[in-house]
Image (cartoon, helix red, strand yellow):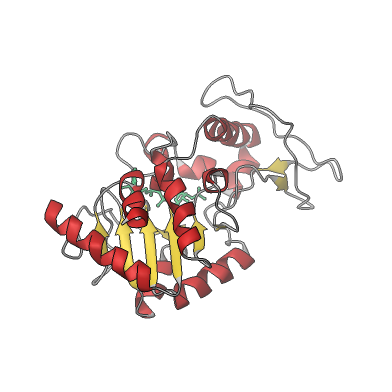
């Protein structure tokens, strides 16, 4: 996983430049969804923002605005200071456990009911899609709820209940593997690591065959996940971006400027 060194642009792509264009684009996307044989959706942190889970790069509130990714989201950082890294991910797990799915998550469940075979791909490490009712979610960047042993890769099962993290930034020693005694590491993909093979292959196939590819709440700066929209464009899909601050995804992308919780329900009821 690697981040593109580029600023997020606020340029509005496609023809959505105002309320009337938004309405026109909404209708266009609703029609395309009705006709589509294959629909795929890629979500990013923005899809969970309305559930109170911070994004990474939004000004002031984004996690990478407040924390150094190189101190927290690399294998080297974990080797250097496991308690700092484990404590940070436990704090994030606590935030997720106390959050609820929002209208955007719920709308994607309804969309999958209308479009059987819809592929839901996420960069998010929370489980809000699943808790809303989505199944077979392809987690490209791992899951907070699935840590594993850094040596033998055995899955670690958390004790039930809310996590005891006294405050943001608390240091907590990671647990040890019951099989080999090595450290348990967070179940997420860090910078410099490869994406899990099976979800990535399935996501790639879904992008290649989609008639409509929705890109929801992502800055599209982190590769290879961001390349999925490019594959879908190359395969002649209608690529639709849903974001209050649209990213530059290339010519021909339809932009619905708005939040996931505001726009996605309109695509389902439309
Ligand atoms: P970013 O924080 O980079 O981008 C979040 C996007 O969501 C931005 O484009 C926002 O404009 C948009 N956004 C904010 N609120 C929204 C809302 N209510 N509805 C819709 N969109 C909204 O997050 P990602 O693109 O997901 O990796 O970041 C990609 C990866 O970088 C993450 O998976 C993470 C990070 O390092 C790992 O944790 C492994």
Residues 76 and 204: in front is 204
**Residue under the point 79% across and 52% down:** 152
Percent x, y for residue 76?
Answer: 59, 47
**Closer to the camera, 178 or 231?**
231
- In the rendered structure, the answer to whether residue 180 lies left or right of residue 155 reads right
**Residue at 59% in and 52% down:** 142
Q: Which residue lies most toward the right here?
A: 179
Residue 155 in picture, x, y percent from top left = 75, 48
Residue at the location (87% across, 45% down)? 179
Q: Quadrant of residue 12?
A: bottom left
Q: Nearer the viewer, residue 260 or 197?
A: 260
Which residue in the rendered view is the most extreme toward the top?
Answer: 166
**Nearer to me, 1 or 21:** 21
Residue 148 visible in the snapshot: yes
Occupied quadrant, residue 98: top right
Relative image position of residue 30 (x, y in whole percent): 31, 63
Quarter of the figure with the C terminus: bottom left
Above or below for 102 versus 190 = above
Taking the image as shown, residue 117 lies to the left or right of residue 24, namely right
Q: Is residue 45 visible?
A: no
x 60%, y 58%: residue: 136
Give the vertical position of 147 relative to 226 (above or below).
above
């Amino acid at each position: 996983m690697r981040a593109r060194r580029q600023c997020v642009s606020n340029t509005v792509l496609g023809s959505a430049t105002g309320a009337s264009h938004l309405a026109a684009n909404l209708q266009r996307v609703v029609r395309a969804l009705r006709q589509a044989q294959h629909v795929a959706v890629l979500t990013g942190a923005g899809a969970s923002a309305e559930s109170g889970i911070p994004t990474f790069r939004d000004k002031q509130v984004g996690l990478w605005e407040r924390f150094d990714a190189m101190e927290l989201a690399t294998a080297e950082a974990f080797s250097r200071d496991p308690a700092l890294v484990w404590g940070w991910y436990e704090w994030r797990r606590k935030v997720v456990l106390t959050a609820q799915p929002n209208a955007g998550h719920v709308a994607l469940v309804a969309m999958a009911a209308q479009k059987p075979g819809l592929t839901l791909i996420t960069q998010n490490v929370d489980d809000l899609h699943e808790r809303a009712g989505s199944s077979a979610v392809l987690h490209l960047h791992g899951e907070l709820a699935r840590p594993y042993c850094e040596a033998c890769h055995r899955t670690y099962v958390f004790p039930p209940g809310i996590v005891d993290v006294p405050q943001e930034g608390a240091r907590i020693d990671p647990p040890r593997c019951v099989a080999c005694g090595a450290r348990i590491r967070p179940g997420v993909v860090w910078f410099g690591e490869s994406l899990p093979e099976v979800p990535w292959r399935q996501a790639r196939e879904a992008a290649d065959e989609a008639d409509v590819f929705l890109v929801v709440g992502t800055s599209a700066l982190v590769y290879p996940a961001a390349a999925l929209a490019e594959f879908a464009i190359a395969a002649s899909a209608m690529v639709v971006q849903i974001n209050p601050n649209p990213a530059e995804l290339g010519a021909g992308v339809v932009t619905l400027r708005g939040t996931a919780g505001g726009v996605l329900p309109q695509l389902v009821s439309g």
